[in-house]
Image: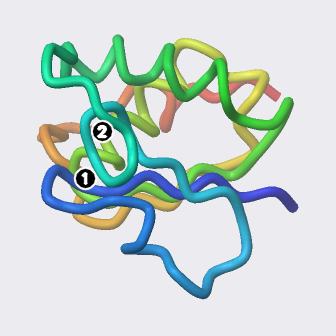
Amino acid sequence: MRRVFLHGMWGGSRHWAGLEGLALDLPGFGITSNPGQDFRPSVLADWVIERMPERAVLVGNSLGGRVAVAVAERAPERVEGLVLVSPAGLTAPATWLTARPK
């Protein structure tokens, strides 16, 4: 099972040090630099989709959790599962969580 780790607003890939999988630094965090980055979850989701394996379990904390849900909504065929750790901005179950295609 492939895992992609997505950090929160004040983190970076180092947040996931020691865990097996692909830990991405979202644009403007960690080793990436992009001061003009658009931080909308949909924009970050497209960025993640371009870099993730063909299929993976997404593990997201805070902002990373919201981005993981956005990835699942935009490309459900690429997401094997979600692990959401205090996801930001989710006040009700996401549509993808209740109506996942088989």
**61 over 43 or under it: above or below:** below
Residue 22, position in %: x, y?
Answer: 67, 57
Task: Please tell me in which quadrant of the rendered image residue 28 appears.
Answer: top left
The amino acid pointed to by label 1 is: Pro
10 Å crowding of disc 1: few (<14), some (14-19), many (20+): some
**75 over 93 or under it: above or below:** above
Position of the N terminus, as image quadrant, is: bottom right
Q: Residue at x 37, y 39 (%)?
A: 32
Residue 41, which numbered label?
none
Task: Please tell me in which quadrant of the rendered image residue 75 appears.
Answer: top right
Name the foreground residue: 35 vs 78: 35
10 Å crowding of disc 2: few (<14), some (14-19), many (20+): many
Q: Residue at x 64, y 29 (%)?
A: 100
**90 over 75 or under it: above or below:** below
Say left or right for 88 vs 8: left
Q: Residue at x 14, y 14 (%)?
A: 36
Position of the C terminus, as image quadrant, is: top right
First in sequence: mark 2 or mark 1? Answer: 2
Q: Residue at x 71, y 65 (%)?
A: 21
